[in-house]
Amino acid sequence: MQLAMNLTRTDAGKQLKLFLAMSRTPHGLIDMTTPVFAALLWLGGLPPAPVALLGLITAFAGYTAVYALNDIVDLRSDRAQLCREPDVCRGQDIDALLVRHPMARGLLSLRSGLIWALGWALVALAGAYLLNPVCALIFAAGCLLEAFYCLLLHFSWLRVFVSGVVKTLGALAAVFAVDPHPSPSFLGALGMCLFFWEIGGQNIPNDWSDVEEDRCQDACTLPVRIGPERAAVLIVVFLFLAVAESAVLFWLAPAARGMADVAAAAAVGVPLLIWPSVRLLRVRTRARALKLFNRASYYPAALLLIVVVRMVS
């Protein structure tokens, strides 16, 4: 009996690990720092405890659902890619810390994946509505845009801009969750900062690492369309814009401390965004692209650290 219970627990643990892999939970937890950063920067302090707790649950559910949705919509193309992909350097990829695309590998059924994604989506939708109905609308729009982004894989490289919009929505929803009437200029700066960061530090480097496989299946990504060399130039441009916009964002924050915050925001962008992107421009390799992707993933967390330090000092 004890042995059977232990085996059941082991199987349940393995199954849960596969679901978490489908939702790229290690990366999702890092991404959760983005809405937290946005809310705290706008408020200049902590929200009420019930709002904070509900917000964290909603953010986790939202990122879990959207990343799972990506694997569901991309299931066919992921299967085709896995047949050609040598998995070179993938051990360095944050998205592959657990199992990369478990449904495409046949480790999870489509039915179980759909139930997992729908369940978390309902939790996120309910939480977002309780925080602010505007947040629920933003979440629904994010799900639709994420599906649209995936469906554009074989049709247009302009999907990169859709990805940029999707990554901004969680942060915008977080601001509306703590204040129903935020500043439009602050929202604009927040959106542009995250838009440039997502394109230059996440989307293009991630597509770069898959460029050979994407060419084999006629995918329309930016590195495939214009080539890795020109894509490297665009990465540097977008990340310089992200760092510049982060300085504007901190300047517009209600509780900003002038040039000290602006300098700090610009400073964290150098080691996480600018330096690795310049290195990729100089030596254009798959490993360098993945290193940039991984480093850039921590950029919102670094901005959050600046806000926390300012709050406690």
Image (cartoon, helix red, strand yellow):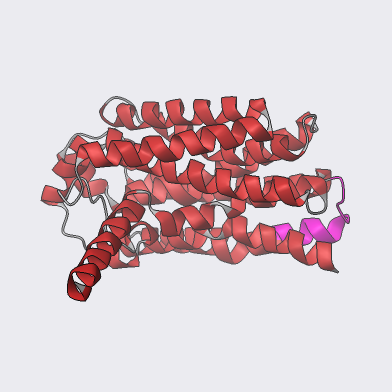
Furthest-left residue in view?
83
Q: Residue at x 16, y 49 (%)?
A: 82
Which of the two residues, 56 or 74, is positioned nearer the viewer here?
A: 56
Find the magenta span and give its range.
254-266
Judged left or right of residue 252, residue 36 is left
> Horizontal placement of 63 versus 91: left or right?
right
**Magenta span includes 265:** yes
Majority secondary structure in the magenta region? helix
Q: Nearer the viewer, residue 221 or 135?
A: 135
Quadrant housing residue 183: top right
Residue 237 in sight? no
Is residue 250 in the magenta section?
A: no
Position of residue 39 in the picture relative to residue 91 (left or right): right
The residue located at (65%, 63%) in the rendering is: 268
Quadrant (top left/top right/bottom left/bottom right) for the C terminus: bottom right
Q: Position of residue 299 (x, y in %)?
A: 58, 58
Image quarter for residue 134? top right
The spot of residue 105 in percent (x, y) is 16, 50
| 292 in relation to 177, above or below | below
Q: Is residue 147 left or right of residue 112?
A: right
Residue located 23% across and 51% down the image: 102
Q: Is residue 287 above or below residue 239?
A: below
Q: How many marks?
A: 0
Establish if 245 lies above or below 311: above
Camera-side residue: 101 or 108?
Answer: 108
Where does residue 128 sit, x and y in percent of width and height? 60, 34
Image quarter hosting the N terminus: bottom left
Q: Residue at x 27, y 55 (%)?
A: 100
Report which quarter residue 21 is drawn in: bottom left
